Structures are given as C-alpha cells and as structure tokens.
Image (tube, rainbow, N blue to C red):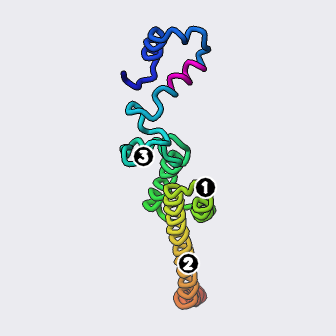
C-alpha cells in the first residue's frame, strides 16, 4: 500500500476499516499516521536511523531543513545580496552611504546572531556575511570617491592660485591700457 495521504487514499482506507465510522476525522487521521510511522513506507520518522534516510529525507526532517524558515529566510535574503552586488555597476556618486551602512550593520549583527541562536543556522550566517561584505565594498567605494573629490577641489584651488589669478591680473592690466 502506498504512503500517499491524499483524499483518494483516505477514502480507500475508510472503506477498508469498519471501526473508523465512529471516530472523528481528526482521530482517523491520527490513526493513519500512527499506522505508517517507522515502517518502510515512512522511514523519515525520528526513530529511523540516519543511514536509511536519503539526502532529501534528511533535509526534509532537519531542524533547519527545507520545511522551515531557517532554510527559506537565507534563500530569500540572497536577493538583497544580489541587489547590493548589482550596485557595483553604478557610479559611486549615485550610491547611498546610509543604505550601504545599514547593509553593513545588518550583515555584521545578524552574522553574529546566527551563531548564537538554536538551532545554529550556518546558511543564514553565510548570507548575512555576504551582505556585510557587499555593504563594506560599497561604503569603501563611496569613501574613496569622496576623498578623490576633496583632492580634486584642492587641486582646483591651487590651480586657481597659480593660473587663474595671474590671468585675471593680466586681464585688468589690458583693460586699463585700452
């Protein structure tokens, strides 16, 4: 008999057992689950040895498996990391320093927190560390751009002293002679 728990399976089982007529649907469902626990039809129960379980069954029954938020939160958060990484293509003058500082802070705080919580979630720690790295790179790009702008402004002031000021003096002398 297959281990499918669909409507057709429940109807067939209800016809086969006459004692289930007096039970409520909830009790009936518990009877079906108890019947198949620990058998070859369902080796993914807690008492079954890990060697008999396939990789998918171990992922399915794990504390941080694919049925839990511990798996799907990091998967969805990779979208934030990719969005931050696509900003590598943008010029630094169009980047937001506060946004990237927030990414950097979020990544660092939550990376630490992922090792404190139980169960320890390494997938979430990895995505948060990547978020911290992306924020750090973007903040470094912004700071380097701002430093280059300050250097450019200083160079312009020196050029004004060296070139523009004498040119203005020559211009005023030429106007006086005319």
* 30 within the magenta span: yes
Please report whichever mark, 2 or 3, sits nearer to the chain's N-terminal start: 3
In the displayed structure image, the side of residue 149 where residue 90 appears, left or right: left
* Mark identifier at residue 118: 1
Mark toward the viewer: 1 or 3: 3
In the displayed structure image, the side of residue 173 where residue 11 appears, left or right: left
Return the residue at label 2.
Answer: 147
Please report whichever mark, 1 or 3, sits nearer to the chain's N-terminal start: 3
Return the residue at label 3.
Answer: 49
The location of residue 152, given as percent across then percent down, is 53, 79
Q: Which quarter of the image is occupied by the N terminus?
A: top left
- Dot 1 and dot 3 residues touching (CB under 8 Å): no
Q: CA distance from mark 2 to mark 3?
A: 61 Å
Residue at point 53%, 59% (across, down) = 125
Q: Give whichever of 55, 47 is nearer the camera.
A: 47
The location of residue 104, given as percent across then percent down, is 58, 64
Please report whichever mark, 2 or 1, sits nearer to the chain's N-terminal start: 1
Over which residues does the magenta segment extend? 27-33
Element on which disc 3 rests: loop
The location of residue 176, given as percent across then percent down, is 60, 88
Element on which disc 2 rests: helix
Give the answer, above or below, for where 22 lies relative to 98.
above
Mark toward the viewer: 2 or 1: 1
**Residue 145 at least partly seen:** yes
**Residue 103 at least partly seen:** no
Residue at point 43%, 60% (across, down) = 89
Give the answer, above or below, for where 115 lies relative to 17.
below
Residue at point 53%, 84% (across, down) = 155
């Amino acid at each position: 008999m297959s281990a499918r728990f669909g409507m057709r399976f429940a109807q067939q089982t209800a016809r086969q057992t006459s004692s289930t007529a007096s039970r409520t649907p909830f009790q009936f469902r518990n009877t079906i689950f108890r019947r198949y626990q620990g058998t070859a039809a369902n080796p993914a129960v807690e008492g079954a040895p890990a060697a008999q379980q396939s990789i998918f069954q171990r992922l399915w029954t794990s504390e941080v498996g694919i049925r839990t938020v511990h798996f799907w939160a990091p998967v969805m958060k990779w979208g934030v990391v990719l969005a931050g990484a696509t900003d590598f293509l943008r010029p630094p003058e169009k980047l937001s320093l506060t946004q990237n500082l927030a990414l950097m802070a979020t990544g660092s705080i939550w990376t630490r927190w992922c090792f404190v919580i139980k169960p320890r979630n390494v997938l979430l720690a990895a995505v948060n560390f990547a978020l911290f790295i992306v924020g750090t790179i973007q903040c470094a790009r912004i700071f380097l751009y701002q430093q280059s702008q300050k250097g450019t402004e200083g160079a312009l002031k020196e050029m004004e002293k060296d070139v523009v000021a004498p040119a203005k003096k020559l211009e005023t002398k030429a106007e006086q002679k005319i």
